Amino acid sequence: MSPLEKINEALTQAKTFYLATVEGDQPKCRPVAFHLLLGGKLYFGVGDFKDVYRQMQQNPKVELCTLTESGFLRYTGRAVFQQDDALAKMVLAKAPAMQKLYNEQTGYSLKIFHLEDAVAEFRSQLQVLEQFSL
């Protein structure tokens, strides 16, 4: 199993994970549920109208964190947003609940990103169990 497949599996098992950003000198953290492994990249999405999107535009360094069976996962890197809306449309086609928020009537768009210059750490409370530079 590749490192990205391991990360994807941990996020799938957790169901909800947390995305941390920074606003000025204040950390901000929020729960996230969407992720998609496709074509060798692990994608996530945020709304273009949300503070998180603005924060990521100003400082693309983010961290995702979740509990795992043996400890927790930290996945840190630089968020790179896709310029092509085709992936967002594909995601929304499979997610009816998200379609109610992201559509022409609301004017809101789902912005898709992946991490580059990333490091993933599977940790126990005491030590690093596995570490990958991606």
Image (cartoon, rainbow, N blue to C red):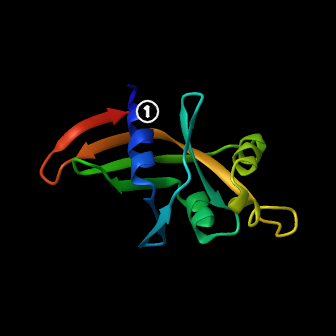
Is label 1 in a helix, a strand or a loop?
helix
Question: What residue is shown with label 1?
Answer: 5
Image side of residue 69 versus residue 57, left or right: left
Figure quadrant of residue 99:
bottom right
Above or below for 25 versus 104: below
Residue furthest top as drawn = 1
Q: Which residue is drawn at 24% across and 36% down?
A: 130
Image side of residue 58 versus residue 82, left or right: left
Q: How crowded is mark 1: few (under 14 residues within 10 Å), some or many (20 or more)?
A: some
Q: Which residue is drawn at 45% across and 40% down?
A: 8
Along the line of sight, which residue is nearer the eye, 20 or 55?
Answer: 20
Residue furthest right as drawn = 105
| Amino acid carrying mark 1 in the image | Glu
Q: Residue at x 52, y 57 (%)?
A: 33
Along the line of sight, which residue is nearer the eye, 1 or 109?
Answer: 1
Residue 70 drawn at (x, y percent):
22, 47
Image side of residue 125 versus residue 64, left or right: left
Figure quadrant of residue 85:
top right
Decide if residue 118 is in sight here.
Answer: no
Query: Which part of the image, by quadrant, shows the C terminus?
Result: top left
Residue 1 drawn at (x, y percent):
38, 25
Q: Residue at x 77, y 41 (%)?
A: 86
Residue 66 drawn at (x, y percent):
36, 55
The number of numbered discs placed on residues in the rendered structure image is 1
Residue 49 drawn at (x, y percent):
70, 69
Decide if residue 64 is in sight here.
Answer: yes
